[in-house]
Amino acid sequence: MPRMSKKRRLEWSFFLRQVKVGNSTCDRITYNDLCRGCTHSCKQSFRAVIILCPHYYSKRRKKEDRDNADNRKYYYLKLKENFFDSDSIVLLEDMKDGILYSNILLKLYLKSLKNGGKLQLDEHIPYTVQMIATLTRHQIGTVERALEIFRQLGLVEQLDSGAFYMTDIELMIGQSSTEAERKRAARLENKALLPPRTKGGHLSDIRPPEIELEKENRDKKKREEGETGHPVPAAYGRYNNVILTDTELSGLKTELPDKWEYYIDRLSCHIASTGKQYHSHAATIYKWAQEDAAKGKAAPKQGIPDYSCKEGESL
């Protein structure tokens, strides 16, 4: 922070406050706590005692007012697609100057939206014919004839207070806010990012030929592997009770090239004789092969009889 000149220090002496910065102290311009939270620039010193400030306007309140202004409500007119095909509108537009009357009617609908259908300047001042003519930018004679026709068609009523009331307005009032519009725009943006859908509501199935070929291969593999998504096992062994998948059988042939048939038959005989069940037949075979290798016992090669014998035994 640059050092103050003597002149500036003298001018701001009432606002200067010593603050500790690290191992040293320095003078800083310090405002009153109330003024620090105010949006106006007329700040007072921390030494001043403020009892009441008529110009105080808090920063938080300014933010809330700004948010409220951003989220203000507005009204709109909801018309059905057959609005101009209704009997009253068809008869109205068929009259002389009927298009003008239709234009006046729509303007009156819009003017009455925020007052629930009443044509009035505020809660106590209803619109006069002269005011309506000025607001709709039509001649007063045209407005008088239009209002009389509207009354005959049941489109307008005149209340005891003198205010005109649009009879069908309850069905046409729509209201929203800027916050609702932002949320609606966000929903539409998110919807635009979703994948396209067909008439049935399902995702579009249009794919390039390469992806389509990959999909056919995956479907074929799934059909071969069964509905569960796992490879279909087959039965092996002398008693057809050793269950192995093609992947497991291929692994046994690779890791036990001269022994896989021996271990499959051995497990088949063992299951048939004892009735014992195993969670994984492939894992059982691998376990037996590891145990035999640890004991130094070699499984006989396929097709070669085992003539080994212990010491003291004869063949």
Image (cartoon, rainbow, N blue to C red):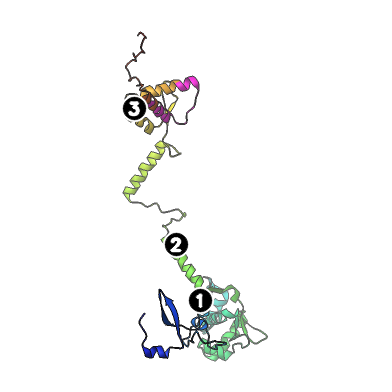
Instruction: Assess disc 3: are there few (<14), some (14-19) or many (≥20) residues with their C-alpha within 10 Å of its C-alpha.
Output: some
Contact (Cβ within 8 Å) of mark 1 with mark 2: no
Magenta-highlighted residues: 270-289
Q: Is residue 298 left or right of residue 109?
A: left
Residue 50, compared with residue 169, is above or below; it is below
Membership of 288 in magenta stretch: yes
Residue 270 percent across, percent down from the top left: 45, 21
Which secondary structure, mark 1? Answer: helix
Q: Earlier in the sequence, mark 1 or mark 2?
A: 1
Residue 222 higher or lower than 34, as above or below:
above
Q: Helix or strand or loop: what does disc 2 sit on?
A: helix
Work out how far the residue at label 3 is from the one at label 1, CA to CA, in angstroms. Answer: 76 Å
Of 262 and 168, the residue lying toward us: 262
Q: Amino acid at mark 1?
A: Asp
| Magenta span contains residue 157 | no
In x, y percent, where is residue 154?
A: 62, 79
Q: Which mark is residue 256?
A: 3
